[in-house]
Amino acid sequence: MSFGLLVIRLAIGLTMAAHGAQKLGPWLGGHGLDGTAAGMEHMGFRPGRRAAEMAGGSELAGGLGLAVGLLTPLAAAAVVGVMAVAGAAAHGKNGFFAQKGGWEYTFVLGSVAAGLAFTGPGRASFDDALGLHLDGAIWGLLALVLGLGAAAAQLLTRHHQVDLTEAPAAPATDSTAAMEVDELTDGGAGGAESGAGEEPRSGGAPGRGTPTSASPARPATPPRAASADPTRPLPGGEVHDGRAPADGGGDAARRAEAAAEARRLDSR
């Protein structure tokens, strides 16, 4: 039994220690503190560097403690806590199974670490060599309470920090107003010319692109004076109702005289 516990401790402990080393430095193909801190910031753990140090340190210390069997319940609590945080923050939304990015892997690692807190490390351990009998239900429950309690505190702090640091989205009217200001200020003479011919909107507000200063009004064409006699043409050959004749004024006068002469001859 002691040999079986040693195999389990080495497998779980060294795996966790390797993950911790990847987070703390550029070892074993890891991203180091800078890369881990950026990932922590993305998940809402701020400041990200402190969160990276806590996660990497817990994995490294807890993993080595399980591997050598030293203070086994405390080492197991560290692994349980960091795996609970990773499962909830990084994998919780993907379901259980690992092939879909779920929390299956973190659940297995945390569960095995908790089991070692109940069974103890066995004889091939530093705890046994030092005469520390840290096993049984009490130590196992203590490891679960410490690990899950620390994970819950970390997750609650994460959500609180996200709520405080997220900036509210700018309303759409601000961007629309900024675009209109740019069109008026940056358009130059071209914007003024394009907006000079537009009619103002209802309510007296100028239309989009209309210059704020009043444009000079075009001079109105004075109406033509009407003739007192409807039958007599105006000097330009137009009658008083605004209709233009086909010919000039002189031709119309000659035709009128010819018609009058014809009526006089017919009356004789």
Image (spheres, helix red, strand yellow):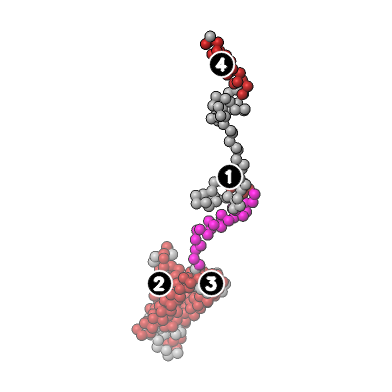
Label 3 Cα crowd, 10 Å radius (few <14 / some 14-19 / many 20+): many
Q: Nearer the viewer, residue 172 or 143?
A: 172
Label 2 Cα crowd, 10 Å radius (few <14 / some 14-19 / many 20+): some
Q: Give the spatial CA distance, label 1 vs label 3.
A: 59 Å
Residue 109 in sight in this render: no
The x and y percentages for residue 149 are 41, 79
Are dots 1 and 3 in contact, CB under 8 Å? no
Q: Which of disc 2 and disc 3 is earlier in sequence?
A: 3
- Amino acid residing under circle 2: Phe
Q: Which of disc 3 and disc 1 is earlier in sequence?
A: 3
Label 1 Cα crowd, 10 Å radius (few <14 / some 14-19 / many 20+): few
The x and y percentages for residue 5 are 40, 79
- Amino acid residing under circle 4: Ala
Q: Disc 3 designates what residue?
A: 37
Q: Which of disc 4 and disc 1 is earlier in sequence?
A: 1
Q: Give the spatial CA distance, label 4 vs label 2.
A: 119 Å
Residue 217 in sight in this render: yes
Q: Disc 1 designates what residue?
A: 197
Q: Give the spatial CA distance, label 1 vs label 4.
A: 53 Å
Q: Which of disc 1 and disc 2 is earlier in sequence?
A: 2
